Amino acid sequence: MTVYKPTSSRSFFLELVLDILVFTVCALICLQVFAQAHIESSRSAAQSQLGIEAERIAEYFKAGNSDTKSLAALLDGDRDGDTLSWYYNRDLEPVGSDEAFYVLACRIDASHAVKVARITLMEGTQKLMEFEVSSYRLSGGGGT
């Protein structure tokens, strides 16, 4: 009966294959982590840019453009009654409402002496940010 002894070259080859397999799995895990980080970074940058756009809308509102008609004319928004909307895709390019990924909406309540604009940023149906801005105009032309 013949007994085969494992040679050192066979052991070395097996160890080398296992090392390559382990490093390949680790590399795939690292690539997935970096890809997810890139996606989250892009999403965060988009939300930050839209937050700046929401603040710009609030500043226009406070500067005296406190009705939907004047805001729509200045900022090129879609007007529907007392609500203005702006629609953006993932790359922050303006699109129609049916292609929108992000929606920036401004609803103006002018039923009292103090006009209030509620500005909302949404991703799909998820609310990302919402804040209110008030504007009061004195009849003499001054205001705060």
Image (cartoon, grey):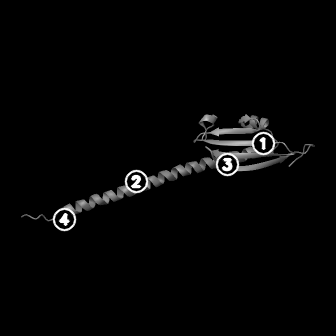
Lower sequence index among marks 2 and 3: 2
| Numbered disc 2: secondary structure | helix
Lower sequence index among marks 3 and 1: 3
Mark-to-mark CA distance, 2 and 3: 35 Å
| Numbered disc 3: secondary structure | helix
Mark-to-mark CA distance, 2 and 4: 30 Å
Residue 128 appears at what percent x and percent y?
A: 64, 49
* Mark whose residue sits in front, 1 or 2: 1
Q: Quadrant of residue 115?
A: top right
Lower sequence index among marks 4 and 1: 4
Q: Are marks 3 and 1 in contact (CB under 8 Å)?
A: no
Q: Amino acid at mark 4?
A: Ser
Which residue is found at the position 19% from the left and 65% from the top? 8
Mark-to-mark CA distance, 4 and 1: 80 Å
Question: In this rendering, does residue 32 appear at all?
Answer: yes
Mark-to-mark CA distance, 1 and 2: 50 Å
Lower sequence index among marks 1 and 2: 2
Q: Are marks 2 and 3 in contact (CB under 8 Å)?
A: no
Q: Neighbour class for label 3 at 10 Å: few (<14), some, many (≥20)?
A: some
Q: Amino acid at mark 3?
A: Gly
| Mark 2, residue position | 28
Q: Neighbour class for label 1 at 10 Å: few (<14), some, many (≥20)?
A: many
Q: Are marks 1 and 2 in contact (CB under 8 Å)?
A: no
Q: Amino acid at mark 1?
A: Ile
| Mark 4, residue position | 8
Residue 130 appears at what percent x and percent y?
A: 70, 49
Which residue is found at the position 37% from the left and 56% from the top? 25
For residue 51, the mark is: 3
Q: Is residue 37 above or below residue 73?
A: below
